[in-house]
Structures are given as structure tokens and as C-alpha cells.
Amino acid sequence: MSKGKAVAVPAVIAVLAVASGGWFLQRDVGLGANLYVQVRVLEEVVKRIEQHFVEEIDVEELYDAALVGVVEALGDPNSALLQAPDWEDMQIRTRGEYGGVGLEVATRDGFVTILAPVPGTPGYRAGLRPGDRIVEVEGESVVGWSTDQVAQLLRGKPGTSVRMGVRRHGVERVIPYEITRAVIQLSAVPFATLLEGAVGYVPVEIFNGTTTAEVKARVDSLVGEGMRSLILDLRRNRGGLLLEGVGLSDMFLDAGSSIVEVRGRTSPVEHYRAGADQEYSGMPVVVLVDHRSASASEIVAGALQDHDRALLIGAPTFGKGSVQSLFPVAGGRVLKLTTARWFTPSGRSIQKEPREQLVTTENGVITLRGEVVQYPDLADRPRFTSAAGRVLHGGGGIVPDLWVLPDTLTAAEGEAVRKLSEVGSQYGQALQNWAVRYLQEHPALEPGFVITDADIAGFHAALLERDVEMTLEDLHRARRTVAYHLGSEIALQAWEDRGWFERNAARDTQLQKALALLLAARSPDDLFRLAGAQPENPVHVGDRVGGRAASPR
């Protein structure tokens, strides 16, 4: 695999930008003078504001706002000036590990609240639960603190301990914990399972530093169990590291196969190719994608589609086809700047224009999950061909081979769900808290539990506690979606990602389409022959092959 310089280049550029500034001022007096005047104007404006504005102003905040404004003026949603905490969070996500206690937290009702303890971590073993509110750290109250502030206190060197106190629903006193920090591994692949007919299922949540290794380990394990075909689920995967996207593609392509091109304005084109022949030749593969599959997940989808190595099922992807380089700047901040674009082996640009990414209830349909999806108009998109001569569409994002809509709502249900969306974050917070209470009240709950009218009424009461203007009739009009959300949140809290999957697999129309085709296919060529659909002819709900439902085991 030919390597790029994604790590080394930013450091070099940063050095050149600082060291060459004086040289430019000397070489081009006109340019230098203009820049000098602009800097002086900024300093003078800030000084006047500091001295004469009617209220006292934090000068540092003014300069920060000016810097942020400079980056925002680029009009690029993927470029940003990262403050130190944001930079640390990005490093954690991309490295896939950090020192801490292993808690996923967010602010809920003014408290930093545990959304979930990471399985197998010190926080998980200590018995911390979703819904617990962190109110003390090292004997100091953290009520009213931000999530970042509390997270900074909980992270630290593995082997050291941290004392914390939490408030739990139904418990009057603050519950004390003393937890020893450890190296926390953030898994890119939460689980893998073998479905009926020896069809393997591997969901990939993010492309961090361990993604390729995790996927290979999972796939090899399933092969050892007798797997004959594979579903690789990249839905809701927002991407991550370029090299991990390349590495995962490499697993399913032969040596020398093109994976992706990186084209920038100021650097040579970089070509990434597979480094060794694949181990899974002859295995039928389906890749699931949707409107939230982005970045590195689109690299994988595009490469495998261009080489006719995998059949893509689902919905057109997000269209995030740009490369960001990281440049350290003063004050512990980092400039994340778009420096190049990605292109698939056939030459398709992954990048979609921002205006094309906007999907509303006016131009889309509402799914059971409460999301809005839309099929784009392909009439004016450029056409490309795969290695086998299949027609592919460019113009941004990856268009799947088979478009399969998730289960959608009726017009009346959609209107009711639109009303739910107006509640905003209060809905999600009430949902999580209600599920916490439900599990406490049902300690012997089995996976096949059913959401009842009484449960809907209980959730309505939880919304009223938050002064949400929502009638019980409103919830019943959106009952299918509300019941889906309630059941999914309970399953996620009780049995983690695998429990969520097992509860919802049978009504996942995209998964069902993939499973039905793989049950009938004996080879990759057989899979494409059975699919038989062109991108212009989307497959709608109910168009199934074999009509079977996934049966995890």
C-alpha cells in the first residue's frame, strides 16, 4: 500500500508558515504592507473596545472570536479552530484509547449524567449506571459544571484513582465511588454475530486507530464459526482516519488495486493501493450504507463498489469527501483545515455540495426511527463505470447499488412525529431518564418485552414533568415511533449494542434485503446477478428476496 504524508505534512507546513513570514514581508512590500495594516487595524479595534466600551470586556475572548471568524469565513463546515478540550476529544476518538474510568457522559437537566459505562472498564465494573448524575469529584461539588470540565477530572494516568459521588434515581443519599483509572479502549466494532445461513454481520461504528485490526479479528472469528458470506454495516458511521479506511478496503481487494486518490491544491496527487491479496476471495459481501455514512466509510464503500467486490445496499451516503490536516497553533489550539479531496478508483468525487446535503420533511419521507430520508435526483449527475462495466453515479456521496427505504410512516404518523421533533432535546433526555426508571422497576426484564399503552402513558408523564406541551393523544398518533424509541433505549441500556441490534433486526428492511440476497448467493457474481437492480430503480419496502427475517444467534 503506498503511503501518504498525512501525519508529516501538517508539521512541516506549520514550520514553514512561521519561519517564512518575515521573508514574504521583505520580498513583497505591497503584500507585506497590506497584511501589516490589517493586523494593526485588528489590534487597534480591540484596544479601543477594551478602553472605551460601555461594559468590561475579556480581550482574550475578542481575539478568539476573531480567529474563529477567520476560519468561518472560508465557508467550509469541516474546517475549524479547535480549543484544547476539543482537540483532546478528537485525539481520543481517533486513537481509540485514553486513561480514565470509561464513562460516556453528557449534560442532562444541568447535571453531568452518565449515558453509558463502557463495557469492561473500571466504571462499568464499579456498578455505575446510565442515568447516574455525577455531583462530586474529589470531594468538590461539580453541579453546574460542563461535561468537558468533569471529563478532564475523570481522565488521568492509568493506575491512579479518582473519588466521585453520584446521585441515582430512588436513592436519597449521594453514592460514593473510588475508581482506579485504566487504559480505556474505545471499540470500533461493538460486536459481531452469525445470522442464519452462515451470514456474518459486522457493524463498524468509527474509523479510529484500531478499526482495521478489530474488523479483521471479528471476520476471522466468524470464518472460524463457518461464515460463508458477510454483511459489513457502515450505516451511521461518520468516518475517521483515512489510513484505517484504506486498511479496511485492503482486506477485501487484491494487491495493487486502487483504493482512493487524494488531490490537493498545493501537493502532488496521492494514490493509495491495496498492499496484499485479500484472504476472503470468493466470499459474497454486502455493505450497508445510509445518509449518515461519511468520510472514511465512503472511501470503503466507494472502493469496494468500484471494484465490484461488494454489493452496496441502503441509501446514498452523506458526501463528506474532503481531507482535513491538523496544524498546531499557539495557546494549545489546533487548526483543522480542509486541504484536499477524495476520489474513488473510478474517479468519482465523494464530496457533496452543502446545499445538496440538506434534507427536510418537505423533500423527504420520515422513517420509523423519526429520521428524514430522500432519494436525490440523479438526472444531471456524471456517470462512471465499475471494473465490470456497471453504471455508477458521481457528483458527491456514494449511491448504493440497491436503494432500500427503511420502514416509513404514514402521512398522519409523519405529522405526529414532526410535532415530536419540535420538543428538541427534552424528548431525548426524557427518553433516557424514563428508560433508567423502567429498568429499575423491571429488574427481571427479558429481551422480548413489549411496550404497552401504560408505558406510553408513563413516558407522557415524564414529558409533562419537563413542561413539554404534548398530549397523550399526540404520542399515540406517533405510537410506532415512540414505542420504537422506548424499546430501543431500554434494550441499549440493558444489553448494550448487541441487545439493540437483536431487538430491531427483524424490522430493519435494509438488513433483511442483504440477508435475503446472501442466503441465495453462492459467489460475488451470483450476488450481483440476484440483485439485478440499477441505481435508477430503487428497491422499496416490501421488495424482498425470499422474505426471511434475520435471526441472530
Image (cartoon, helix red, strand yellow):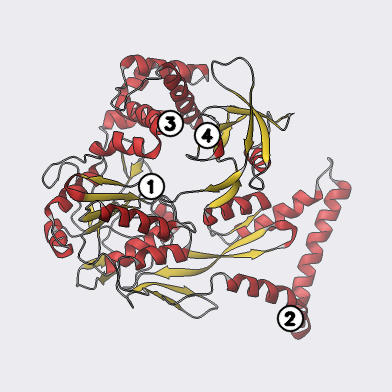
Q: Which residue is mark 2?
A: 24
Residue 481: % across, % down:
33, 30
Q: Which residue is mark 4?
A: 125
The quarter of the rendered structure image containing the N terminus is bottom left
Categorize mark 3 by other alpha carbons within 10 Å: few (<14), some (14-19), many (20+): many
Q: Secondary structure at mark 1?
A: loop
**Numbered tag placed on residue 499 in the rendering:** none
Amino acid at dot 3: Gln
Q: As displayed, is residue 306 above or below residue 167? A: below
The quarter of the rendered structure image containing the C terminus is top left
Which one is earlier in the sequence, the residue at label 3 or at label 1? 1
**Numbered tag placed on residue 493 in the rendering:** 3
Q: Secondary structure at mark 4?
A: helix
Which one is earlier in the sequence, the residue at label 1 or at label 4? 4
Which one is earlier in the sequence, the residue at label 3 or at label 2? 2
Residue 436 vs residue 165, the one in the foreground? 165
